[in-house]
Image (cartoon, helix red, strand yellow):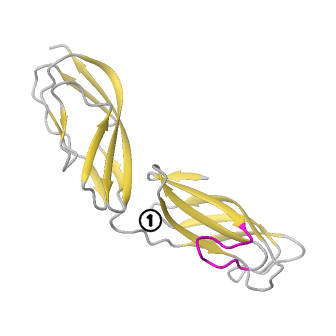
Amino acid sequence: RSLAHGVLYVTGASTLGADGQPAHGYKAGFVTAFSLDGLKLWTQAFGSDEDQYKFIYPHAVAVATNGSFASVGEGDGDLDGQVCHGFSDIFTVLRPVTLDPQLPQRLAYPSSRLVATQNTPLTPVQPTYQGLVTTWTADPALPFGLSLDPATGTITGPPLSVAAPQTHTITATGPAGAITFLLGVQVQAN
């Protein structure tokens, strides 16, 4: 497993193929990406077409910032031009991944901690992100007086009461999935 950019990547092997993709050889490797709310985003299978009795066992997956992945493991079949030497050999698979451009990704606010002062206007705090986001929510709700714009994710105020530091989960949701950001918020006395 690997967690990057709000996406959980899982790797493994299957004799049945993965998500309708055929098994290559006896056991094929796969990488599947899930959003943090459990939505399956994509699956890529890979394996040896050399022989129906060959196997590929991926052990780890790493993800680049562009969404491409690398998987390493062992197998007894040729894979992506790499020739197996002996009964079992190690391998590395590098694959580009084209994500749905509408998938919310790389959600960030200027800081993971927001400290505001009671009854003092807050400079609007705007998120940055990629993809298509249609709704924004905060859980638990922001302190009294602060608001999260449900269409833009911008936080405005003035906060009207003192609030101890608390972590809020900001969720950006679109038609292709959702992503979250943990934002610590504190309101100090004026």
Label 1 secondary element: loop
Q: Residue at x 74, y 71 (%)?
A: 15
Q: Residue farthest to the bottom? A: 50
Q: Quadrant of residue 134?
A: bottom left
Q: Quadrant of residue 158?
A: top left
Q: Quadrant of residue 174?
A: bottom left
Q: Position of residue 157 (x, y in %)?
A: 13, 31
- The residue at 79%/73% (across/down) is 55
42, 99: nearer the viewer: 42
Q: Is residue 15 magenta?
A: yes
Residue furthest top in the image: 189
Q: Is residue 52 left or right of residue 37?
A: right
- The span picked out in magenta is 14-24
* 122 and 54: which is toward the camera: 54
Q: Is residue 89 above or below residue 122?
A: below
Asked whether the viewer can see residue 73, the reply is yes
Q: Is residue 110 visible?
A: no
Q: Is residue 69 left or right of residue 164?
A: right
Q: Indicate the amino acid at tag 1.
A: Asn
Relative horizontal placement of residue 59, taking residue 127 as reference (left or right)? right
Q: Quadrant of the C terminus?
A: top left
Look at mark 1 in the image and give the residue it sits on. Answer: 66
Q: Position of residue 100 (x, y in %)?
A: 39, 69
Please, what is the dominant secondary structure of the magenta stretch? loop
Q: Callout 1 environment at 10 Å: few (<14), some (14 to 19), or many (20+)?
A: few
Residue found 80% across the figure and 85% down from its top: 51
- Residue 34: x, y in percent? 50, 57
* Position of residue 156 measured from the top left corner of the image (x, y, whole percent): 15, 36
Q: Is residue 15 above or below residue 169?
A: below
Q: Is residue 168 above or below residue 3?
A: above
